[in-house]
Amino acid sequence: MSEPTRAVKVWDLPVRLFHWLLVALFLFSLLSGKMKGNWMEWHMYSGFAILALVIFRILWGFAGSTHARFSSFLAGPGACLRFAKRLLSKAPAYVAGHNPIGGWMVIILLLSLLLQAGTGLFANDDISIEGPLYKFVSKEMSDRLTAIHYYNFNVMVFFVFTHVAAVVFHVFVKKENLVSAMFTGTRNLDAATEVPAARFASSWLALILFALALVAVYLVVKRPF
Amino acid sequence: MKKKMVMIAVVAALGAGASFQAAAQAKPEQLVKQRQSAMVLIGWYFGPIGAMMRGDRPFDAAVVARNAGYLEVLSKLPAEGFQPSTKDEKTKAKPEVWSDKAKFDKAMENMQGEIGKLAQVAKGGDMGAIKTQFGATGKSCAACHDDFRMK
Ligand code: HEM
């Protein structure tokens, strides 16, 4: 078996920060959403922050570093199938950035987060709190979107669970350093793995894009005009 | 203000006395209307307190105390509308309301207890204390809705 002899930088700082901030806010949203009462106020702020993060990540998927770009990791069904076969065989399955299946997981997670935060903006709990856009829809529509908010959360938990299970598989069965790579940005790859020339975008650009996302969310939530 | 409170209390007391007899013969759809109306009113007077606690509306201790006073009476009303005869009505009440009656009743009592405390605290007019008790009360509503109300 080929040993992972090369340390290759793949994840830029914005992607790593995005990932762990999202994990923290996801957990906080889960807890505050279940605890109800006065926690719901913080649940909303957490949701707004997640919305800004997801919008940033979508922008970064077009303007960011090579391995952050959707165009670099979205693969067709053929590639996914071939990768799945390699994954289940004894052969190593190193890929510099996202692998073909993991790439789709990124899309699924981002879209389901967008749906979750989007429906949250229109939600109401019939007790004391409503999303900032509640006033623009009928009560029935808000109730329906609230139900989606509720069911989609369970769907999201399933995806997150699958995501974590896949990482555990890669770490313990395929012996890849995926978790530490999400902290350090550097992955250990074997000599045979093809490493495309990667361009790293400036973290300042990321900061500007994130600020834009925050302003967009602020305008939607507060509508100062 | 005082007079209004007394009137509400009297009307509610009369209403409760009268309807305890009526409930036995009341049609299921009337019972459903009774409990849903009560819940709507509870939400109506509870919601604005939350808006004040979050700063979405200016804090007005008098309005909070008034609403909390109303809620003390209102919180006693919906229990009566949850009769087994309404089982087959198309509503948001889950079948567990009747299959796990003890737990449902407990949740109702909990909420009434929290509302009682809210009414007490509201008289003091201290926003911090009201906010804490408001949160606890909101949890007692949500605890029942989570288990006994469809999404
Ligand atoms: C855009 C911001 C968001 C707003 C305004 C919002 C609003 C709400 C509201 C009003 C409820 C109460 C619904 C009910 O009790 O029937 C709720 C519940 C909940 N939300 Fe959100 N939400 C947002 C984002 C999120 C996000 C991003 C997540 C997950 C990561 C999330 C997860 C939950 C959960 C787990 C519940 C509790 C469901 C339950 O078990 O009753 N929300 N949210």
Image (cartoon, coloured by chain):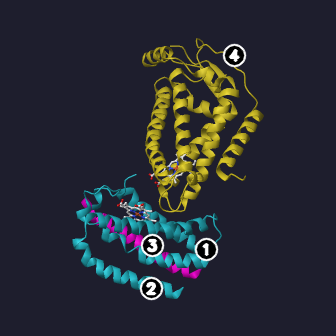
Chain colours: A yellow, B cyan
Q: Is residue B116 magenta?
A: yes
Instruction: Name the subunit of mark 1.
Output: B
Q: Which residue is mark 3?
A: B114
Residue sitting nearer the eye, A191 or B106? B106
Asked if both marks, 3 and 2, belong to the same chain, the answer given is yes
Nearer mark to the viewer, of 4 and 1: 1
Which amino acid lies under the numbered mark 1 shown in the image of this protein? Met
Which amino acid lies under the numbered mark 3 shown in the image of this protein? Glu
The circle drawn on residue B47 is: none
* Among numbered discs 1 and 3, the one appearing first in the sequence: 3
How far apart, in angstroms, are the residues tagged by discs 4 and 1? 60 Å
Q: Left or right? Give the position of A166 relative to A110.
A: left
Q: Which residue is mark 2?
A: B7
Q: Are marks 4 and 3 in contact (CB under 8 Å)?
A: no
Q: Which residue is mark 4?
A: A197
Residue shown at 59%/14% (left/top)?
A193
Instruction: Name the subunit of mark 4.
Output: A
Nearer mark to the viewer, of 1 and 2: 2
How far apart, in angstroms, are the residues tagged by discs 3 and 2? 23 Å
Which amino acid lies under the numbered mark 2 shown in the image of this protein? Met
Nearer mark to the viewer, of 2 and 4: 2
Q: Which residues are magenta?
A: B98-126
Instruction: Please tell me in which quadrant of the rendered image residue B29 appears.
Output: bottom left
Instruction: Name the subunit of mark 2.
Output: B
Which amino acid lies under the numbered mark 4 shown in the image of this protein? Ala
How far apart, in angstroms, are the residues tagged by discs 1 and 2? 27 Å
Asked if both marks, 1 and 3, belong to the same chain, the answer given is yes
